[in-house]
Structures are given as structure tokens and as C-alpha cells.
Image (tube, rainbow, N blue to C red):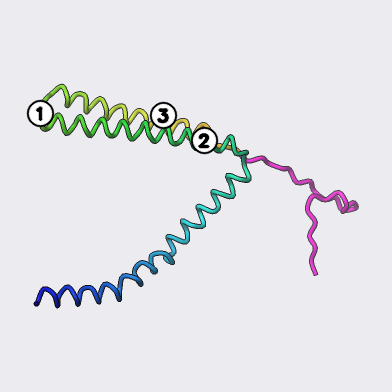
Amino acid sequence: MELFAFVLIGGIWAAFFLPSLVDGRRSAPSSSTRSFHRSQNLLASVAIGDARELMARKRIAARRQRILLGLVGAAGLSLVLAITRGSGLLLAVTIAADLAIGGYIAVLLQTRQTARPTATVVPLHLVSDGDPHNASVRVVAG
């Protein structure tokens, strides 16, 4: 009977507090910041390139992620096998897999720094004092 009462009181408290906790997480500044960042990235991807280029980038990123996860999985599996079997050879395989992970991450960082997309720069022309019709930017103020 005491267990039933404890579960009942715990359920009432959970029903009272859980909705406010979940709702509070959605309206937290970090989640709204993430949402804003996601929408800005979506707008930037639409504004920068065409759909084929974007899909190619997504495929490349997915392939790189699969390769990295495969390397991490191989390193973890070889470590577990090396520990359970007590094998020095499997420990060497684990070290080699760790070195491969480090090298792959270094290559990814290197390609990321060299392949940064550059934005198109549109030069603004200075307005001469006598000819306001050739201005690139006009300010209309009341």
C-alpha cells in the first residue's frame, strides 16, 4: 500500500512538473538561437547555390560522416577485442585505427580551410557631388 501511495504521489508530481520542464526547454534562449541559426543556414543555402550543388555537398558530408563513424567503430571494436582477448596484435590494430582517425580529421580540417566559399563582392560606386542619378545607393529620408 505504501508503494502504491508513493507511485501515485510521484505520478501527480510528474504530471504537474514535466510539462513545464519540457515547455521551458523549447522556449529557452539556446533553442531559439539554434532555430534561428538553422533558418539562417537554410536561407543562405538557398541564396548561395543551386539545388544540385547543395545536394552534392550533403552527399559528400554524409559520406565523410560514414567514413569517420566506420573508423571510430573499427577502433572501438578492435580495442574491445584487444582487451578481452589480451592480444597485442589487436592493440596495434587499435593504435593504427586511432592514427587513421587523427589523420582523417586533419585532412578534413585542411580541406575545410582551403575550400571556404567566398561571397561575391559588389563594388559600390561613390556618388559625385553633381550627379546623384549614378548612385548605387540612395537614401530616402523624411
Q: Is residue 37 shown left or right of residue 48?
A: left
Camera-nearest label, 3 or 2: 2
Whether 127 is among the magenta residues is yes
Q: Name the residue under label 3.
A: 107
Region in magenta: 119-142
Q: Within 10 angstroms of label 2, few (less than 14), some, or many (20 or more) residues?
A: few
Q: Is residue 5 shown left or right of residue 100?
A: left
Of the numbered discs 1 and 3, the one sitting upstream in the chain is 1
Query: Separation of disc 3 and disc 2 at Cα?
Result: 17 Å
* Residue type for callout 3: Val
Of the numbered discs 3 and 2, the one sitting upstream in the chain is 2
* Residue type for callout 1: Arg
Which secondary structure type mostly characterizes the magenta part of the structure?
A: loop
Q: Name the residue under label 1.
A: 85
User: Image point 58% across, 35% down: which residue?
Assistant: 53
Camera-nearest label, 1 or 3: 1
Q: Residue 113, how many percent across, how many down?
A: 49, 34
User: Image point 20% across, 74% down: which residue?
Assistant: 10
Q: Which mark is residue 57?
A: 2
> In the structure shown, which secondary structural element does the residue marked by tag 2 occupy?
helix
> In the structure shown, which secondary structural element does the residue marked by tag 3 occupy?
helix
Q: Which of 125 and 2 is in front in this view?
A: 2
| Residue 70 in the image: above or below residue 19 | above
Mark 1 vs 2: CB contact within 8 A = no
Q: Residue 19, how many percent across, how many down?
A: 35, 71
Q: Which of 131 and 101 is in front in this view?
A: 101
